[in-house]
Amino acid sequence: RRSERLSQNMAKKNDFMANIGSRYLLINIPAYELLLSDNGKIALRSRVIVGKPKKPTPILTSEIKSMVLNPSWRVPRSIIEDDLLPKVKLNGDFFNQRNFRVFDYQNQKVEKTPEEWQQLAYGQFPYRLQQMPGTNNALGRYKFYFPNDFSVYLHDTTNPNLFNHAKRALSSGCIRIEKVDELARWVANSLVDDKQLWSRLKYTRDTTKWFPLNDALPVHLVYWT
């Protein structure tokens, strides 16, 4: 019954919160919400976008160990096949326009004409893709990396309008954050040692820089209805 399920959920949540510590990042997947707790107080609350039903965001606990400014994006195979090749079939110049570099599996860069890319998009695509940092990059300005078996992470987005949707299960598993600038600022102020370098680079768009954190930030992806 619904009331039983709600009370079970509540008990599970209370147990979890009793052992969570005072500084953490928590993403409640079905609520499309991120909470940052610092010293037992909510330091940030933000809307998020999570994985769609076919590619759901996993439930897990890990630790954010670094923040990447202006990340490049190594595109997973499933996204190449499901999302990008259909666009190349319509527009052979898609890779060039969106700042993708194409490599073979010996790591050699591959160059083709738009017509050749279009033809290749119809067959077995034998290459890997990397989108370079910049204003077109799907990850946006920031990526927050935490070790996990699902290749998911937190990041910015180039399409902020999607945060206006009530149902925000729209990604391929990773989590996009609406208030990503605020989160990046908090992480830089609280957990990054080289604040001078951060200040110098934070307005650039094409220099990729990994900032290790001086203390890991626990991150919890939970499913609480």
Image (cartoon, rainbow, N blue to C red):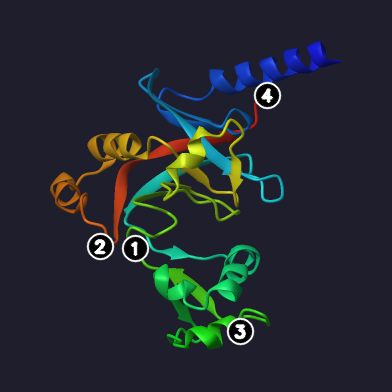
Query: Is residue 89 rendered to the left or right of residue 103?
Result: right
Q: CA distance from mark 2 to mark 3?
A: 31 Å
Residue at point 16%, 52% (across, down): 197
Of residues 168 and 89, the one drawn nearer to the viewer in this rendering? 89
Q: CA distance from mark 4 to mark 3?
A: 44 Å
Residue type at the position of mark 3: Leu
Q: In terms of sequence position, does the residue under pointer 2 or pointer 3 come before the other?
A: 3
Q: Which mark is residue 133?
A: 1
Residue type at the position of mark 4: Thr
In this view of the protein, can residue 184 be seen by the observer? yes
Classify mark 2: residues with Cα within 10 Å, few (<14), some (14-19) or many (20+): some
Query: Pointers 2 and 3 in contact (CB under 8 A)?
Result: no
Instruction: From the top left corner, tell me how far across and down residue 206 is, in percent.
Output: 27, 63
Q: In terms of sequence position, does the residue under pointer 1 or pointer 4 come before the other?
A: 1
Q: Which mark is residue 225?
A: 4
- Secondary structure under the numbered disc 1 in the rendered image: loop
- Secondary structure under the numbered disc 2 in the rendered image: loop
Residue type at the position of mark 2: Thr
Q: Is residue 5 above or below residue 178?
A: above
Query: Pointers 4 and 2 in contact (CB under 8 A)?
Result: no
Query: Pointers 1 and 3 in contact (CB under 8 A)?
Result: no
Q: Which residue is mark 2?
A: 207
Query: Within the image, what quadrant is residue 25 found in?
Result: top left
Q: Which mark is residue 174?
A: none
